Amino acid sequence: MPERAPARRPLPVTSSRAAALALAGICAAAAALRFAGLGVQGYHHDEVITVMRVIPGSFEHMLHQVRVSESNPPLYYVLAWGWAKAFGSGEVALRSLSALIGLGVVPVGYLIGRQLATRRAGLFLAAFLAVNPMLIWYSQEARSYSLLVLCCALSLLFFLRSRAAGQGRDLALWALFSALALCSHYFAVFPVAIEAAWLLVALRDRLRTLLPALLAVALTGAALLPLIAAQVNPTHIGWIENSLLSTRFFETGVSFLIGETGHVIAEPPRERYALVPAFAVAAALVLLLVGGGRRERRGAAVAAAVGIGVAALAALAVLLGKDYVVERNLLPALVPLAAVVAIGCAAARPRLLGVVLATALCAYWVAFDVYVTQTPNLQRPDFRRIARDLGPARVTRAIVSWKLAADPLRWYMPGKAPRMYGGTERVGEVDVVSKPVIAPAPANLPPSFRPVQRLRYDRLTLTRYVSRHPMEISSRQLKAVRTGFGRDAIVLDGPFGWRPSPGVRTRSASVARGVEG
């Protein structure tokens, strides 16, 4: 009788237990990185749109504001509306929703890596997603991007499972999370379309099981079309195409490695911080090509096809006249591309080499994440501090700054929210929030306005001009004041009708002592 092949030994129970413990530790680290710094930075422009315009008021008001003030689908705002009613709209309270959602991406990443390759690849991917600066940045933002990443990751997971087995339950879950992804952000259409086409080819002999799932996703997309038509507003997203497409793809790569740091106030990204993770990514790809087995290479190829496919379809949309390519919109590509790197580290021979590489990459990202919390120059603009230093208005004043600074300043200013400046007003004070390089130059204001104070905030400078007598100044004159930004806006604050104030005389007297530093 021919000899029987030796039975394949099952993986020991301790390996799955060890993986579970390791995953628990990774999730704990992810939670610490996301929740510890929720209140370090103030709200930026887009977040203020969420808290000031969209979610206050009734549920019907929220849906109306999504249609007239937003360029995204409603799912996140529905969740944020309920969350704010329960916990409030402060930075820590509202951002904790995004942090919780972002934390959920980590265990899903483990399942994706395990499905694509091995348990080790799953742990590496979970670790990368736990500490990646881009994901932490949007886990600490009151916007829909963290939800987009989670829904797309879940869609990817059940796409992989459906592709492998074609089970009805997996297809139903793929359809559910694909529909939720479409309802969280319109760019989810790219990974969902790739997965749908792939399933249509891979499961062409099981169309009776597949078609209901595809139909459900298609109907969800069709239901969003009226909202998309209503949200078409060049002021929302028309600024995107002002820079070269190649530049934006390069900036996306940098942001995927170090987050949005240094790139949220009309400045280029700080690519020097991305050199170390870029080297680690390149090394992981080499390890995949040199030491990867058949399963690892196949799994990496599937993940790469989805990740690169998102960017390719976005570029194709540009050729069709729909240019919305920007870093955060391409977030659906981050998880599958990170999976390729994780599989490369897991495929290394000897294994210790992959462990060292993955550990080094995670250590760099953790150090950089902590460094960002200690470095205001890498954070969102500190409009919260500027508003505090401006203080309550003693006279009618105009605040001139970057267009995207107007709403945050209105949100953080004490007392009744200031209104946007239009036409001509009598003002006794003009405050200019500019880039530091612009601040020393005299502002284009009437001679009676003298500089009395100048405060530096890393990438911004506040210069206060005061007049002893009120002056009628038009919004056109104030928009001619240089700030260093492409488009400016003016906020009007203080009592209507100028009245002399002891505070104004005191500050005007400081001219004799020179501008304060």
Image (spheres, helix red, strand yellow):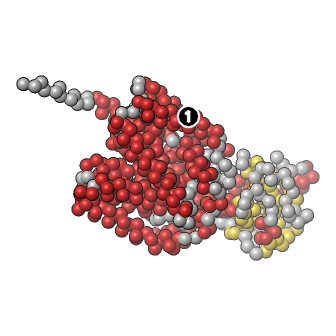
Q: Position of residue 357 (x, y in %)?
A: 49, 30
State the quadrant of the N terminus: top left
Image coordinates for residue 255, horizontal then vertical, percent: 57, 46
Residue corresponding to mark 1: 279
Image location (x, y in percent) of residue 318: 55, 61
- What's under tag 1, amino acid-wise? Phe
Q: Residue at x 51, y 58 (%)?
A: 314
Q: Quadrant of residue 392?
A: bottom right
Q: Nearer the viewer, residue 345 or 33?
A: 345
Q: Secondary structure at mark 1?
A: helix
In which quarter of the view is residue 414 placed?
A: bottom right
How many numbered discs, if any? 1
Residue 134 seen in this snapshot: yes
Q: Position of residue 463 (x, y in %)?
A: 80, 55
Between residues 395 and 137, which one lies in front from this camera angle?
A: 137
Q: Can you see residue 61?
A: no
Q: Is residue 478 left or right of residue 513?
A: left
